[in-house]
């Protein structure tokens, strides 16, 4: 029996909207921020999202550190016997079609519930329409399908899967954080690599302390 997850779907949806905005206006330098409170104040993802499970063991953690219109750094921290270890980082560049496809797929997977009815064909269509066609961009369903298959088979197989006609989401901690929000311009991954490394090292240490 899976333990209850506590993901903040509204925060994930906001990030999804920002990816769609990036796809829609890839050639436009200035875009209005999509992270807003009702008061108009800019919302920082790390204010609203450090999510995980309410009780019980986890198989690991997924960290997403993101800079608008620039990149998404994905760190997979998985439990190996008696400790948590970080796997090789995935960098998605949001000004590239492969990066846009993979980031859109990941965010849509995070919205799904464990045990939910799942059709791969309908899921691919949803991503194609909502992220690309409605934003004036053209990609083949084959590209999206291939990227999704790679996630289920290799890059995200510890976190997500399919069992028959149902979606499987294993119990893990999710951390999302936006960086570079006060610069007024896009920043590169290399500019913040050391900061991201320190952030992830701290997360791994805290996870290992929790089981020591």
Image (spheres, rainbow, N blue to C red):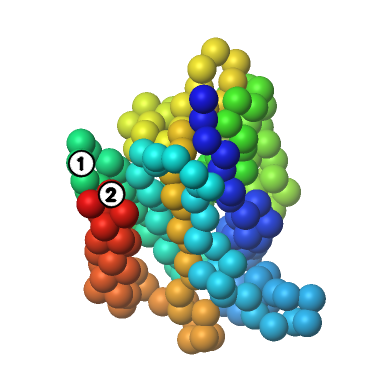
Q: CA distance from mark 2 to mark 1?
A: 8 Å
Give percent across and percent down for residue 92.
40, 55
Name the residue nearer the viewer: 209 or 95. Answer: 209
Q: Is residue 43 visible?
A: yes
The residue that appears at 58% across and 31% down in the rendered structure is 114
2 or 1: tag closer to the N-terminus: 1
Q: Is residue 133 above or below residue 191?
A: above
Name the residue nearer the viewer: 207 or 42. Answer: 207
Q: Is residue 133 above or below residue 201?
A: above
Mark 1, residue position: 82
The residue that appears at 20% across and 41% down in the rendered structure is 82
Q: Tell me: 165 left or right of 83.
A: right
For label 1, the SS is loop
How many numbered marks have been drawn onto this rendered protein structure?
Answer: 2
Res. 120 image quadrant: top right
For label 2, the SS is helix
Give percent across and percent down for residue 28.
60, 72
Q: Badge 1 local density, few (<14 within 10 Å), some, or many (20+)?
A: few
The residue that appears at 40% across and 56% down in the rendered structure is 63
Q: Badge 2 local density, few (<14 within 10 Å), some, or many (20+)?
A: few
The numbered mark at residue 121 is none
Q: Tell me: 80 left or right of 161.
A: left
Name the residue nearer the viewer: 116 or 22. Answer: 116
Mark 2, residue position: 211
Res. 127 image quadrant: top right
């Amino acid at each position: 029996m899976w333990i209850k997850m506590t993901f903040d779907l509204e925060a994930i949806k906001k990030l999804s909207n920002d990816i769609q905005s990036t796809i829609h206006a890839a050639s436009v330098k200035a875009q209005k921020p999509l992270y807003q409170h009702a008061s108009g104040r800019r919302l920082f993802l790390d204010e609203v999202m450090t999510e995980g499970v309410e009780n019980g063991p986890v198989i690991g953690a997924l960290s997403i550190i993101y800079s608008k219109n620039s990149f998404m750094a994905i760190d997979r921290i998985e439990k190996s016997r008696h400790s948590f270890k970080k796997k090789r980082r995935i960098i998605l560049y949001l000004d590239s079609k492969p990066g846009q496809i993979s980031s859109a797929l990941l965010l849509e997977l995070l919205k799904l519930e464990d045990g939910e009815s799942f059709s791969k064909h309908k899921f691919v269509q949803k991503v194609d329409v909502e992220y690309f066609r409605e934003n004036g961009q053209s990609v083949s369903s084959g590209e999206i399908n291939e990227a999704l298959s790679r996630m289920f088979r290799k890059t995200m197989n510890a976190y997500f899967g399919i069992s028959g006609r149902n979606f499987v989401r294993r119990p893990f901690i999710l951390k999302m954080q936006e960086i570079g929000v006060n610069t007024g311009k896009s920043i590169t991954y290399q500019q913040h690599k050391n900061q991201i490394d320190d952030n992830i090292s701290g997360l791994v240490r805290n996870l290992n302390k929790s089981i020591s």
